[in-house]
Amino acid sequence: MAWLAKAYTAARWKLPEPAFTPTVKADGTMQTAHGTYLKFYVSEYREHKGILMFEWLLERGRKFGLEGGTAMRAVAGFGRHGTLHEATFLELAADLPVEVSFILTEDDAALFLDLLETEAIDLFYVKFPVEYGFLPD
């Protein structure tokens, strides 16, 4: 675990450097990169250390040096417990699912998951390979 603390400390204090700088190839097409799409699913009102979990995950990703992250609230959903949560007029305080996602390098995904594991929190996530890039202006 010493290597993890060292990697986390190094990552915490580094200035975020783009993992991918888009460039136009000689044939006029955009260069793309390959990485990992890491997605977490949490309940809207779930907290960790007094902060809403989706906000905590985004803040943790920002401090880790990730280039971006997004939290999206669902219209409806159910999890492993089978309880359906949905936004209705009569149920204004529904505890809806929130999806928190990051696109990052495979190495950063592994380090980020290791970091979250040290927090001893119960999180469901999915990760899969992606190709990403930017379209020319």
Image (tube, grey):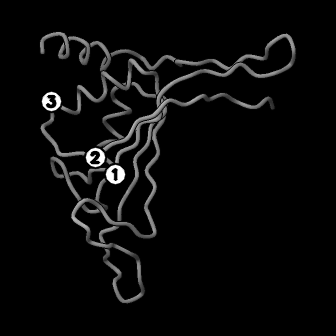
Q: Position of residue 113 (x, y in %)?
A: 28, 30
User: Which dot, 3 or 2, sits closer to the camera?
Assistant: 2
Point 32% across, 75% down: residue: 94
Report the quarter where the N terminus lies: top left
Q: Is residue 130 left or right of residue 12?
A: right
Which residue is label 3 attached to? 118
Point 29% across, 12% down: residue: 10
Which residue is label 2 attached to? 124
Residue contact between numbered discs 1 and 2, judged by CB atoms under 8 Å: yes
Amino acid identity at mark 3? Thr
Question: Residue reaching furthest right?
Answer: 27
Q: Measure the C-alpha gap from mark 1 to mark 2.
A: 6 Å
Nearer-N-terminus badge (3/2): 3
Q: Is residue 74 above or below residue 39?
A: below
Q: Is residue 23 above or below residue 35?
A: above
Point 34% across, 51% down: residue: 41
Nearer-N-terminus badge (1/3): 1
Label at residue 41: 1
Q: Position of residue 25 (x, y in %)?
A: 79, 13
Nearer-N-terminus badge (1/2): 1
Residue contact between numbered discs 1 and 3, judged by CB atoms under 8 Å: no
